[in-house]
Amino acid sequence: MAESALTGRRAAIALRHQTGGPSHDPDPPPIPADRRCRALLASPLPAQQAPAVIRFPREWLPTDVAINPGLTPGVIHVDTANTWLYLTLADGLARRYKIAVGAAGRNFRGQAHVGRKAEWPPWRPTANMIRLEPEVYGPFAAGLPGGHPLNPLGARALYLHQGRRDTMYRIHGTPQPWTIGQSFSSGCIRLVNEHAIDLYDRVPLGTAVHVR
């Protein structure tokens, strides 16, 4: 995958395997977990303050797992409670991805389909995001171009539609890999950039999405 997929002001962010949960190098001191996303959105972090290494347990890496063989292949199922996304395959298998989901009360629920796909998409906060958190999103009201280190959509985005209507929810990458496994976002479903690219390449337009 492209090295630029994990952005961070030249901070070397790499994925490594271990059996525990996500951890960060102790030097320099990490930003508290509940403030990392907002701190990065509010102002660029100097390289020496950005987490140098993000470590994920092996089971968080994309992998094929056994599922109910009765499920239709080619459908995305999102388990927000346990922060997993499944893309059903043939022969009773699914491709599983670890995700971050919306904070309490902000998650999308229900059925949709992939109405649009974009590589390194531009981003603009919604009016509702600015209304709820003007100090965080107000400075970005004009939007950010694709590939910008503060653009929260990351490397790829799948736009969720219901009929012809854009739900304003996305399945997308993130420049903030330390948020994976948490209920953190404004409602969208986030993956590590490399994982978002892997999913993007497997999903055609029109793919059904079930979120619970």
Image: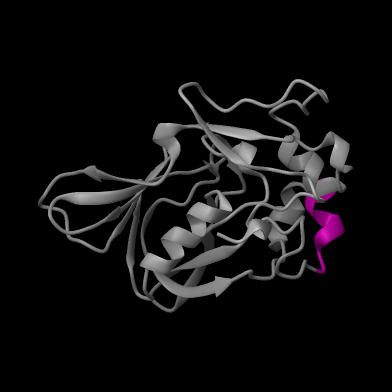
Q: Which residue is rendered at x = 49% and y = 66% of the image?
A: 158
Position in image of residue 205 (x %, y %): 38, 76
Is 155 positioned to the left or the right of 191 in the image? Answer: right
Q: Which residue is rendered at x = 22% and y = 58% of the image?
A: 89
Image quadrant assignment for residue 16: top right
Labels in figure, total: 0
Question: Does the rendering let one see residue 190?
Answer: yes
Depth check: give the residue in front, 131 or 71.
71
Tell me where the magenta segment starts and ends, as one range.
Answer: 134-142
Is 154 positioned to the left or the right of 149 in the image? Answer: left
Report the coloring of the rendering. Answer: one colour
Is 138 positioned to the left or the right of 179 in the image? Answer: right
Position in image of residue 43 (x %, y %): 87, 47
Whether 163 is drawn above or below 62: the answer is: below
Position in image of residue 35 (x %, y %): 75, 32
Q: Which residue is rendered at x = 69% and y = 70% of the image?
A: 122
Question: Does the rendering let one see residue 153?
Answer: no
Q: Quadrant of the N terminus?
A: bottom right
Is 19 positioned to the left or the right of 188 in the image? Answer: left
Position in image of residue 32 (x %, y %): 75, 25
Image quadrant assignment for residue 68: top left
The verdict on residue 139 being magenta is yes
Q: Which residue is rendered at x = 76% and y = 49% of the image?
A: 8
The verdict on residue 170 being magenta is no
Look at the magenta stretch and give its main secondary structure: helix
Q: Quadrant of the C terminus?
A: top left
Image quadrant assignment for residue 54: top right
Whether 83 is drawn above or below 113: the answer is: above
